Image: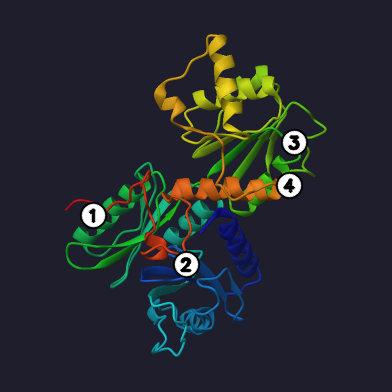
Amino acid sequence: MNAAETRALLTALTAALTRGQRAAMATVVGVRGSAYRREGTRMLVLEDGAQVCMLSGGCLEAEVVEVALEVIRSGVPALTHYDLSEDATWGLGIGCGGSVDVRVERVDPEDPVTARWLAALGEERAAALAVPLSGGGRVLVMPDGQVTGRLPDRALHTFAVAAAQERLSLREPRAVTLTAPDGTPVFIDVNVPPPQLVLYGAGHDAVPLAAQAHALGYAVQVIDPRPAYLTPARFPGATLHDLAPEELHRFTPGERPHLIVMNHHLDRDRVCLAHALRSGAEYVGVLGPRSRAEDLLRDLEAEGVTFTPEQLARLRSPVGLRLGAEAPEEVALSILAELMAWRRGYDGGFLSGHAGRIHDAVTHAPFPESTGPAH
């Protein structure tokens, strides 16, 4: 789930608990074959049957709500398997050709593990929740090694903590179910701070890019020395930095940064490009034709500013996927589509004609997945 979905879910949960309503959290913990969403997708179900967020395209939700209402009443977690094929046992008849496992648990805000997990989600801090899918218990692991909760079996606890720590060490960690040495499946749910998108420039075409990125869960930062352009009305939800080029040393990108140079001003773009390439961010895009970035680099070299091959390898120019984009909204779509593909290790090509499964269309792996902790 992206940060925007998580924020919506937590807002609804907080409001429900304030009203005295009970709630259950449904989480996709296993996917085989084709499915609409992947492991780690969550849906909130309230005791009046209301739901927030979705686990699928609408095909599973009614069944999951019924399970969740029983879990709310009994307090006993449930793990349910859903077959999404045409002859599905549950009568869903979706025809996706895959299957999904969904775990539903009543939300107990007084439980220390639950309280700290919800706090990590709300504060957008990194954390990993390890849940055995058979037996009981849960453990919450923080990047600094702090562990909340304990599993009844010592060996299983050791495995779960190591697995959670290992997932947190990945650049783009995703939820996964791993098998412990004793055969117990352990679901590792992961939360990380939202990726950051930094826009050098607050021009007309930065507006839809910031808006679309915010809707996708990015923490958007906009830098520009023109107060008239740099306003909350133009960039709702973004953090704004009124900085001239000579003041860029006052700005340091945060965690998981992705930087786009789009001032439409050669002098500002030149200084911003130097700042971006020196920042350590692994993704630096320059809006405009390839020749523009080449000119900027030549001008910087003439000033005595050079970059290492590693720094230059981070440069994306022209930035975006080749979609035929023209309007600012289309250009924003092109940039964010490339950024999503790059972050997740895909080439951004057509799905039609791809021989494999949709979610197996990986062509390169900048963020390799792990097979779990060694044991």
- Identity of the amino acid at label 3? Gly
Please determine whether, in this image, residue 180 is positioned above or below residue 295: below
Q: Quick check: 81 left or right of 259?
A: left
Mark 4 Cα-neighbour bin, 10 Å: few <14, some 14–19, many ≥20: some
What amino acid type should be assigned to the residue bearing mark 2? Arg
Rendered location of residue 243, percent (x, y): 70, 25
Looking at the image, is mark 2 or mark 3 earlier in the sequence?
A: 2
Q: State the residue at coordinates (46%, 26%).
A: 312
Q: Earlier in the sequence, mark 3 or mark 1?
A: 1
Q: CA distance from mark 1 to mark 2?
A: 30 Å
Tell me if 56 is positioned left or right of 269 in this view: left
Residue 329 vs residue 153, the one in the foreground: 329
- Closer-to-camera residue (331/56): 331
Asked which quadrant contains residue 227, the reply is top right
Q: CA distance from mark 4 to mark 3?
A: 14 Å
Q: Nearer the viewer, mark 2 or mark 4?
A: 2
Q: Which secondary structure lies at badge 2?
A: loop
* Tag 4–tag 3 contact (CB < 8 Å): no
Cα separation, mark 2 vs mark 3, equals 35 Å
Residue at which label 2 appears: 37
**Which residue position is annotated with label 4?**
236
Q: Earlier in the sequence, mark 1 or mark 2?
A: 2
**Of the numbered discs in the image, which one, if any, rests on residue 203?**
3
* Label 2 environment density (alpha carbons within 10 Å; few <14, some 14–19, many ≥20): some
Q: Amino acid at mark 4?
A: Pro
